[in-house]
Image (spheres, helix red, strand yellow):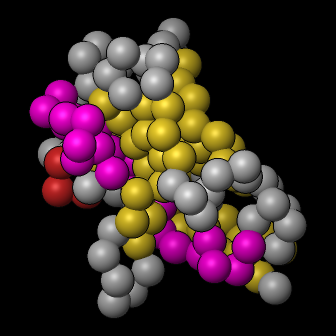
Amino acid sequence: VQLQASGGGLVRAGGSLRLSCATSGRTFSGYTVGWFRQVPGKEREFVAGIWRNGVSTFVSDSAKGRFTISRDIAKNTLYLQMNSLKPEDTAVYYCAASSRVIYSNLREATAYNNWGQGTQVTVSS
């Protein structure tokens, strides 16, 4: 499974960005996919995910109401629409996929074994 994230950039607080994650063709078949973020010195943090059934979505408390995760099967692409961005959203954002995630660990980075290269999101105040 290959993943490639893009769409990061510099945006002012209150602005929006849409991240994309291009995947290899089989990624959405039986895989749970998600977005994580990381700042220097901290662990990788769960942001949002889509369960392998393609229906159930999960969003972290910090992203709830502002971020939306979605996927386009025809384009083999995962998205993260981020609205009302805050300076504390500044991080490197990674997309991830795994066929081995279970419900109890889907928010844990260690549950995912396929990662994109990361894209930097910087939100200025």
Q: Quadrant of the C terminus?
A: bottom right
Q: Furthest-bottom residue in view?
A: 41
Q: Is residue 100 above or below residue 45?
A: above
The residue sitting at 59% across, 43% down in the picture is 80
- Where does the magenta region start and end? 86-107
* Horizontal and vertical percent position of residue 54: 43, 18
Q: Is residue 11 left or right of residue 121?
A: right
Asked whether residue 21 appears in the rendered view, the answer is no
Front-lying residue, 5 or 48: 48
Q: Is residue 13 left or right of residue 78?
A: right
The residue sitting at 74% across, 73% down in the picture is 86
Asked whether residue 30 appears in the rendered view, the answer is yes
Q: Is residue 48 left or right of residue 9?
A: left
Q: Is residue 100 left or right of residue 26?
A: left
Q: Is residue 91 above or below residue 81?
A: below
90 drawn magenta: yes
Q: Quadrant of the N terminus?
A: top left
* Horizontal and vertical percent position of residue 106: 29, 44
* Horizontal and vertical percent position of residue 8: 61, 59
Which quadrant would residue 33 be assigned to in this image? top left
The residue sitting at 62% across, 71% down in the picture is 89
